[in-house]
Image (cartoon, rainbow, N blue to C red):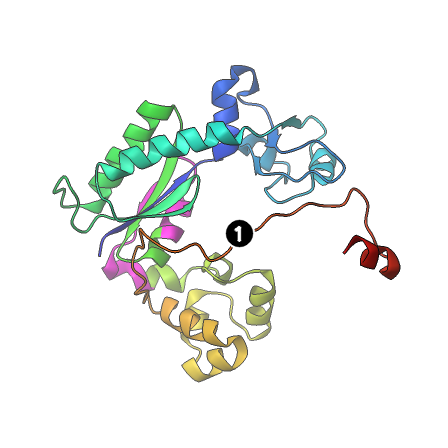
Amino acid sequence: MKVIHVDMDQFFAAVEQRDNPGLKGKPIAVGHDAERGVVSTASYEARRFGVHSAQSIQVAKRLCPQLIIVEPHFQRYKEVSAQLHEIFHDYTDLIEPISLDEAFLDVTNNKKGIELGIDIAKEIKQRIFETTGLTASAGVSYCKFLAKIASDWRKPDGLTVIHPDRALDFISQLKVEKIWGVGQKTAEKMHFMGIFTGADLRNQSQQRLTEVFGKMGQVFYNFARGIDNRPVISEWERKSVSCEQTFEKDISDQSAAIIEL
């Protein structure tokens, strides 16, 4: 299987900087400027100060006093996302969207008959830039796990290929924090076990990993060996719909919380 993972660079922020040239080269954060506002995306200029997505707007402003807060324009982002998918469909219909700005593409049997995945990725990146004025990073490999990691490897505007012959060496040097499914708590557990790299993870037995991490233990065992048999899924059934709203002020009193519930 030939898999490409396409990931737009600082997507929301990049769209805002494209549409408002006065924002180019400046530290911006896309989000609602309020007490409970959260950063959706930060420009690379803002990231140098430690600003990142899912961070409180108030914390972001303390880290970067000159930060410019830009209200999000989701309809515009959706329109750009639709342009991306038009380009993707010129190469394959096996497309698995992850979010508005990233997707997996199975180009094993692509519509243009292009032999090498890297050549397809180069074309897609170029067409994205010509069509939208935005840059994307792409990763190419034989499975989703490695294609995803590859797309993050040389951001922004990067292109990385992980060949099957180099996969195990690449994974060996990989920090476990870079592995899909390893969040902060899992990483802390792994570090306590002496697991810091892919090589350390590969030295763990399947039994030990499943004892500590349950079903994910098997996934980690396989990933450490470059095994990921998940197909690129272009059709699926929606299983949930969610919505959230944050209170303006914390509620810590039990009776007040019960009233709100």
Is residue 167 inside the magenta stretch? Answer: yes
Q: Quadrant of residue 78?
A: top left
Counting from the top left corner in percent of width and height, residue 261 is at 76, 56
Q: Is residue 161 left or right of residue 180?
A: left
Q: Is residue 158 left or right of residue 30?
A: left
Q: Measured along the vertical axis of the image, is residue 255 above or below residue 111? A: below
Q: Quadrant of residue 143?
A: bottom left
Start-end of magenta stretch: 148-168
Q: 123 or 111, which is in the foreground?
A: 111
> What kind of residue is marked 1?
Val
* Residue at x 62%, y 28% (from the top left corner): 71
* Residue at x 54%, y 73% (from the top left corner): 194
For residue 253, say whether it is visible: no
Counting from the top left corner in percent of width and height, residue 192 is at 60, 73
Q: Measured along the vertical axis of the image, is residue 112 above or below residue 143? A: above
Q: Which residue is mark 1?
A: 241
Counting from the top left corner in percent of width and height, residue 8 is at 42, 37
* Residue at x 40%, y 43% (from the top left corner): 102
Counting from the top left corner in percent of width and height, residue 220 is at 43, 70
